[in-house]
Image: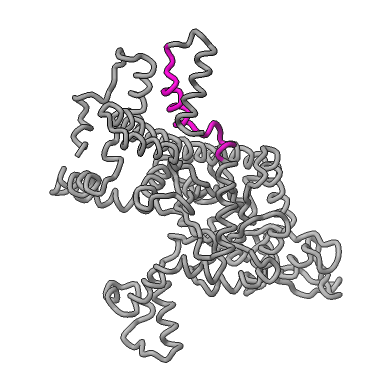
Amino acid sequence: MAYQDQIAQAQRIIETAKTWDGINPESVARMRLQNRFQSGLDIARYTAKIMREDMAAYDADPSQYTQSLGCWHGFIGQQKMISIKKHFGSTKRRYLYLSGWMVAALRSEFGPLPDQSMHEKTSVPALIEELYTFLRQADARELGMLFRDLDAARSSGNQVKEKEILNAIDNHQTHIVPIIADIDAGFGNAEATYLLAKKMIEAGACCIQIENQVSDEKQCGHQDGKVTVPHEDFLAKIRAVRYAFLELGIDDGLIVARTDSLGAGLTKQIAISREPGDIGDLYNSFLDCEEITPENCVNGDVVINRDGKLMRPKRLASNLFQFRPGTGADRCVLDCITALQNGADLLWIETEKPHIEQIAGMVDRVREVFPNAKLVYNNSPSFNWTINFRQQVYDAWEKAGRDVSQYDRAKLMSVDYDTTELAKEADERIRTFQADGAKRAGIFHHLITLPTYHTAALSTDNLAKEYFGDQGMLGYVRNVQRQEIRQGIACVKHQNMSGSDIGDDHKEYFSGEAALKAGGAHNTMNQFAA
C-alpha cells in the first residue's frame, strides 16, 4: 500500500474512533511501514517466494546464482545487508546463512563448543529471530531517515524533493532476505526434528538445511569421525521438516538435504532391506564385509546376505560399521537422488576441498535423474584456499607439460610465491570459483559458513596490537573511526544505528512538543554529520 494510502486508511480509523484526535494518521502510517512484517511466518512466506523465484532464474541462466555469508549475531546480519544495499543498490540474490558451527562456538551457554550438536537447540531459532529483529530495525532506521528528509523538504517548500522522497518511500526495498538455517542432524529423532523445525519456521526461516549424520555422533563436516544414517532415517527427518512447513502454512518452504558421505566412512546401523535392490539393500551394498560360514559365525555377529553369500560387515571397537574405501562419491550420488525423490529442494555435498570438477562429477550423475538438481555449496574457511588452488594449477601445468621446476608443490603457501604466475592464475581461479561452479557444477547458492568469526578475530587482533602498543588511541582512530567516516560506514553514528533516532520520533508522536529527545544540539553524534 502506498504511503498516502496508508495515511488515508489511518485517518478513517481515527475519525471512526472519535476520541483519538491526538493520534496523527501520518505518524501511524510511518510506524506501520517501519513494521511491515508482523511475525516470523510473514517473513518465511515472503522469503520463500524470493528463493523460489531465484531458483527459477538460475535454472534459466546459471550466471544468476545466489550468495550468503554466515552470521552469529543479529548485528552482523544487519550490517551485511546495509552494506550490500550501500554498495550494490539491491539485496537481490544475497541471503544470510545461519551456521550451526557458529551457534555452537559463539552462542552456547556452555561456552565455546565444537560443532557436535551439544549446544542448546533453542539457540538456533533464537538466533533466527534475532537476525530478523535487527533486519527489521534496519528497515525502520532507513525509512525513518526518509521521513525526516520528507519533513525537511516540506518545510523548505521543495516540492520536487518531496515527490522524489515519496517515491523512494513507496519503493523502499526491505533488508529482509532469506536465511538458510542449519538444523544440524535434527537434534534427535524425527519428532525432535519436526518440533525444532517448527520453532525455526515460526522465527522466520524459509529454508532449513539438514544433514545425514547420526544426531548423537554428529561432527563438523570437515572433521573426521563422521557417521551417517540409513536413508530411511534421513528421509523421515526430511518429511518431518516438510510437515512443519505445511502445518504452519509455508507451502513453498525449502529444504536443503546435505550429505556428508564423501568423508564419512562409518555407519551406526545396518539398513533394513525388504527386497533386493531397495534403498536399504543399496545402503548395505557399500559396507565393507568379509565372507563367513555358519561354522565361524559367533554370537553377536551381524550377518547379511550378499549375492547368496553370508557376509559379516566389519565392525569397529566403537560398535560402528565401516564402508568400503573409495565408495564416498557413489554414496553421495545415491544420497542426493533419494533426497530429491523424497521432497528435498536443494542439495549440499560436503567436500574436503574446493574442486569444481570433483563436485561436477557427482552432480552430473545426479542430473541424469534430476536435470534441474541444484546445490548449496560451502565455500568453507576450513579449506586452505591458497594452497588448494596453487596445487591445482601446479598439477594442471605439470600435466600439460609446462615447466614447474621453480616451484615446490609442498610449499606453495609460501609468501615467496605470491607474485609468481602460478599464484596469479590460482587467485584468478579463486576469484571465478563461484561463477564457474554455478555454470559447471550446478551450484545455485554459494555461502561462506564462518566468515565473520574470522573477520572479528583478525580485526580485533589488529586493533589490540596497535591500541595496546605504542600507537595508543591512534590505532583506533586511524584504522577504525577514520575509515568508517571516509567509507561511509553507517555505524560510525552508533547512536543512530542502535535506534536512538527512532525513539526520538516516537517520543514526538507520543508527547509532541513536550518530548525530551536525545538527538539535540549537544548530541556528539552531530560531529559526524559531515
Residue 419 visible in rendering: yes
**How many marks on residues?**
0
Q: Position of residue 417 (x, y in %)?
A: 29, 76
Q: Residue at x 33, y 35 (%)?
A: 497
Nearer the observer, 319 or 157: 157
Nearer the observer, 88 or 282: 88
Q: Residue at x 80, y 74 (%)?
A: 292
Q: Residue at x 61, y 69 (%)?
A: 363
Q: Position of residue 241 (x, y in %)?
A: 67, 46
Q: Residue at x 31, y 37 (%)?
A: 161
Q: Quadrant of the C terminus?
A: top left
The span shown in magenta is: 22-43
Q: Does 197 sit left or right of 87 as displayed?
A: right
Nearer the observer, 332 or 35: 35
Residue 109 visible in rendering: no
Q: Position of residue 348 (x, y in %)?
A: 58, 60
Vertical comparison of 41 with 523: above or below: below
Vertical comparison of 299 with 464: above or below: below
Q: Position of residue 143 (x, y in %)?
A: 39, 34
